[in-house]
Image (tube, rainbow, N blue to C red):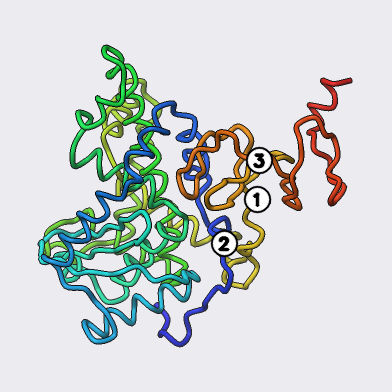
Amino acid sequence: MKPYEELREFPELSAAAFQHPHDVQATRNLQKVPLLAPLLKLVSSAVFEKQIRLLSISGAVRLGPNQGVELYQKFEKAAAILDVPKLPEIYVSNRYVVNAYAFGLENYQITLFSGLIEALSEEELMAVIGHELGHVKCEHMLYKTIVFVLRTFGLEYFRRLLPAGTDMLVLLPLQLAILHWERMAELSGDRAALLVVQDKEVVASALSKLAGGSPKVLPEINLDEMLKQADEYEDTETGILEQIIKVNMLLQQTHPFPVVRVKEIMGWGDSEQYRHILNGEYVRAGEFAKLVLSEPVAKKCPKCKSLSNVSASICLSCGSSLQGAALVCANCQIRVFSTWQTCPGCGSPLTTPSEEAAAA
């Protein structure tokens, strides 16, 4: 990893510049889940956020300019690299597990566990901080809070949202969809980690240690051997039985398997996309809406004013219902109507080629 002063920062970086395509697709699929709207409404009460923050304040150490200065400076630098303007709170918990997590709906927080801090090098620890900030940058926090609620309280907590006799028909697919989304979101977090430390082997080493577990073994981890394990795992895809076993293994997993993540991030570290970002050629924040929208007409969230595709029922940014939301031109954002074919503001077509052909 380069010295702090040599690490490049990415002003106005948009999450769209590095977000993993599987993460983007999983998010779109999650928006189509019928139960998601009442679930988001329940979670958005922020009761869980207040509860977790109280637990953190009472049972962990909050870092800042006057507390854990060296680690907090890493945190500030990572946020500057990813252009995260509003810093979350960051805590250190005395639980001896090699892990960290990000949480929150309105006021985000990141928690590092003491086992993680002791197991990782300074560079690897900064990569983990970058990973958690990546979740904030990619606006994963709303859905990650749902995952936390599911993990903590289980499916029983949400049964009251459903008509009698329909719970298992809906809750199991919902759980599987959310867990799949979280696994894909972790891949974007790993890319954010690489953008922070700008050394793919540091990120891969940190991921390897998350899999290792024992402090006696951690210093001996060999990345080449980890990549061999990843190849062996992928080679088992040819048999039907192996594929069934893999699917069954993944169903309840919240994270992709570490060896898979190691190979994924090593590959992205050699990609043109990553090199372009390092050279300052990346999507800026102001261009994000144009990238995520696949239609010329969009819905404008009445609460946060973010744009979503017309087919979306829930705002991805804040979780608000889009029922009755105004239609706007995706290019210039002026109010339009579904019967219009051209935007009167910027002249952009408001229909796709397939729609025009169907009309003809």
Question: What mark, if any, has residue 291 been given in the picture?
Answer: 1
Which structural element holds mark 2?
loop
Left or right: 29, with 328 as reference point: left
Among numbered discs 2 and 3, the one appearing first in the sequence: 2
1 or 2: tag closer to the N-terminus: 2
| Nearer to us: label 3 or label 1 | 3
Disc 1 versus disc 2: distance between alpha carbons?
10 Å
Q: Looking at the figure, which quarter contains the N terminus?
A: bottom left
Residue that carries the numbered disc 2 in the rendered image: 14
Q: Foreground residue, 235 or 348?
A: 348
Earlier in the chain: of badge 3 and badge 1, it is 1
Q: CA distance from mark 3 to mark 1?
A: 20 Å
Residue 351 image position (x, y, % from top left): 80, 34
User: 10 Å neighbourhood of mark 1: few (<14), some, or many (≥20)?
Assistant: few
Please say if the residues under marks 3 and 1 sit with CB atoms less than 8 Å apart.
no
Identify the residue position indicated by label 3 in the image.
326
Residue 117 position (above or below residue 307): below
Q: Quadrant of residue 153?
A: top left
* Residue 228 in view, yes or no: yes
